[in-house]
Amino acid sequence: MRKNQALSGASAGQKPCVLIVDDNQDALAALAELIDDFGFDVQVAYNGELALSMIHTAKPRCVVFDVDMPIMDGHALAQTLRTYLGRSVVLIGMSGHPPEDPRIAPVLPLVDHWLSKPIDWQRLEAVLAGLNAT
């Protein structure tokens, strides 16, 4: 991945891609189904390292990720995405831990939106609706 390489996002007539990254397969499947129902092309990865390997083929407009993951956690994923892609991709972090938790606080400046688990589906839908406006 080259530094500051922008992602093109969805072309005219295509649904924007949302990449979901979570090591909990049940949570990932439920979230993927919901986001698909919202009208997005959905791609999934079970850890941050796998997500990074998919970035240039999936060309996500948004990455929704859990902070607590093996191999590469959400903090490292967010740092890497911001280093190489800047603000060309919308990052939505999520966790069952409160935002003031020491594991979560360093991630907050890197993300565009934060969602606490359990996810407020209406809030997520509102955030994702903004992807179609850009």
Image (cartoon, rainbow, N blue to C red):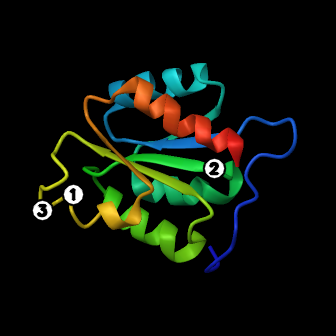
Q: Are marks 3 and 1 in contact (CB under 8 Å)?
A: yes
Disc 2 residue type?
Answer: Pro
Residue 64: x and y in percent read 45, 45
Q: Residue at x 50, y 29 (%)?
A: 125
The Cα–Cα distance between marks 2 and 1, rounded to whole angstroms, is: 23 Å
Quarter occupied by residue 1: bottom right
**SS under mark 2:** loop
Q: Going from the N terminus, do you reach mark 3 or mark 2 first?
A: 2
Foreground residue, 68 or 14? 14
Residue 66: x and y in percent read 33, 46
Quarter occupied by residue 13: top right
**SS under mark 1:** loop
The Cα–Cα distance between marks 3 and 1, rounded to whole angstroms, is: 5 Å
Q: Residue at x 81, y 36 (%)?
A: 14
Disc 1 residue type?
Answer: Ile
Instruction: Say few, some or many: other residues with alpha carbon within 10 Å of mark 1 (under 14 / 14 to 19 / 20 or more).
Output: many
Circle 2 residue: 60
Circle 1 residue: 104
Q: Nearer the viewer, mark 2 or mark 1?
A: 1
Q: Going from the N terminus, do you reach mark 2 or mark 1 first?
A: 2
Residue 26: x and y in percent read 34, 24
Q: Residue at x 67, y 49 (%)?
A: 58
Disc 3 residue type?
Answer: Pro
Instruction: Say few, some or many: other residues with alpha carbon within 10 Å of mark 2 (under 14 / 14 to 19 / 20 or more).
Output: many
Q: Which mark is residue 71?
A: none
Image position of 127 with respect to 100: above or below? above
**SS under mark 3:** loop
Circle 3 residue: 102
Q: Residue at x 57, y 48 (%)?
A: 62
